Amino acid sequence: MERKPVVIGVAGGSGSGKTSVTKAIFDSFKGHSILMIEQDYYYKDQSSVPFEDRLKTNYDHPLAFDNDLLIEHLKTLLSREPIEKPVYDYSLHTRSKEVIHVEPKDVIILEGILILEDERLRNLMDIKLFVDTDADIRILRRLQRDIKERGRTVDSVIDQYVNVVRPMHNQFIEPTKRYADVIIPEGGHNHVAIDLMVTKIQTILEQKSIL
């Protein structure tokens, strides 16, 4: 009988560095059987919603995510079966017709701002991490990213942060920190915490006779 894969959840606010932490852990296990699932791929399909209404989508609210599909896909991977991961088209604000074929692996890293908000998701995780970074650092990182990668203006990024991102973080994301097994300050720059997590994951895998 095959061993059940290990699921590691990496949560944290926008710009916290959770993606850097996820990538650092992933890179540490290169050559082993590991995959990443990003919650951002699981925004709800809005093809039946008028485009003008899609523009008002609050991507930082729990209801923006199709957690039912995400949970179904995680359970499928845990059963050692492949999935067709959805792709989200941000230019159309709805799910793309494209999908990504994902084969099951021994280690699954689930990354996203609200993965700890849903108890059903938490129950599927072996380790729950929360990347905790000061708000001023997070807004600066978001500014840099959105201006450079998404062609946004400074004013539009700040307006979105003040009116949507910050209140959603305080209401929905920050409270999920209490569910974390480990809190990692300062994200990808915290090499000590990342090294400790890699060692812990290695121990779990050895106990499951995966490594």
Image (cartoon, helix red, strand yellow):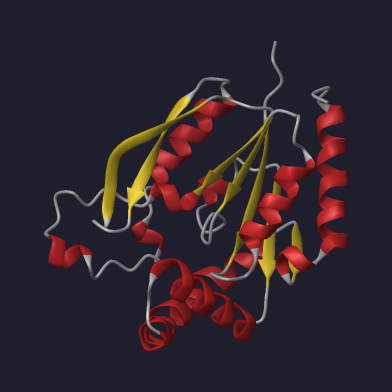
Q: Measuring 35% from the left and 49% from the top, which residue is drawn there?
A: 88
Spot occupied by residue 31 in the image (x, y as percentages of width and height): 76, 30
Q: Measuring 57% from the left and 71% from the top, which residue is drawn there?
A: 15
105 to the left or right of 164: right
Please, which residue is most extreme toward the left here? Answer: 50
Q: Nearer the viewer, residue 28 or 7?
A: 28
Assign the C terminus to one quadrant of the image.
Answer: top right
Q: Is residue 4 above or below residue 110?
A: above
Spot occupied by residue 124 in the image (x, y as percentages of width and height): 60, 40
90 to the left or right of 177: left
Q: Quadrant of residue 150?
A: bottom left
Spot occupied by residue 208 in the image (x, y as percentages of width and height): 81, 26
Q: Is residue 53 above or below residue 24?
A: below
Assign the N terminus to one quadrant of the image.
Answer: top right
Q: Measuring 79% from the left and 43% from the top, which residue is drawn there?
A: 28
Spot occupied by residue 179 in the image (x, y as percentages of width and height): 65, 60
Q: Quadrant of residue 136?
A: bottom right
